[in-house]
Image: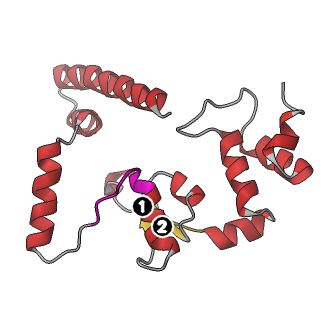
Amino acid sequence: MSAQELEQRREKRKEAEANRQVAMESGDAEAILKSTKATVKVTREQNEETKKLLRLMGVPVVEAPSEAEATCAALCRDGKVFAAATEDADCLTFGTRLLIRNLMAAESQKKQILEVNLALLLEQLNITMDQFIDFCILCGCDYCDTLKGVGPSTAIKLMVQHGTLEKARGKLR
């Protein structure tokens, strides 16, 4: 289902490669670094070496049977870990209790580390977990296209007014 997302990532990598070439020709060190980071693709061998190193250091390694975010969310939901640190908000739809974003952001980006508490989020939005999942689907995700004209504001209004995606669907063109 996320083939389209993977294709978009490939396109972004191609664009970053072109930007890197331009930056190298102009000698812009900051742009070279930025575009180089966007073109890096970690190999299976690098992953295996990293896991081996972590194990040798005594750090537990959990290998996800499928989607990594789903596994991280389950570990957090079940109280095995304190939080899930990722840039992928899908972790919330999988039930992680605490999401940490921007943890690994470069200092030069000056991004604040963001903590999202799922229970507090649901309380403040005054919606259920099922409604939150429907809200996320309306906003767009890795598994389906976005709906033209439906962003977070419209999506939450639809959830509050209609309660479910199925009931809100009739109000969408």
Q: Position of residue 76 (x, y in %)?
A: 47, 72
Check disc 1 and give the amino acid type.
Answer: Thr
Which residue is labeled 1 in the image? 71
**Label drawn at residue 74:** 2
Secondary structure at badge 2 equals helix
Q: CA distance from mark 2 to mark 1?
A: 5 Å
Position of 123 with respect to 41 (left or right) is right
Residue 111 lies, with reference to residue 167, above or below; the image says below
Q: What residue lies at 22% left-to-right and 31% top-to-bottom?
A: 28
**Badge 2 density bin: few <14, some 14–19, many ≥20, Cα 10 Å:** some
Name the side, left or right, on which 119 lies relative to 83. Answer: right
Mark 1, residues whose alpha carbon is within 10 Å: few (<14), some, or many (≥20)? some
In the image, what residue type sits under mark 2?
Ala
* Membership of 64 in magenta stretch: yes
10 sits left or right of 59 in the view: right
Identify the residue at horizontal 9%, vertical 65% (top origin).
53
Is 114 or 63 nearer to us in this picture?
63
Residue 154 drawn above or below residue 111: above
Query: Would residue 85 be seen by someone viewing this image from the given angle?
Result: no
Give the residues in magenta: 62-69
| Image quadrant assignment for residue 57 | bottom left
Q: Pointers 2 and 1 in contact (CB under 8 A)?
A: yes
Residue 134 circle label: none
Q: Which residue is located at x 61 percent, y 29 percent?
A: 145
Does the image show residue 84? yes
Seen from the viewer's position, the closer of residues 83 and 52 is 52
Say how the picture is coloured.
secondary structure
With respect to residue 92, does 55 lie above or below?
below
Relative to 168, say whether 84 is above or below. below
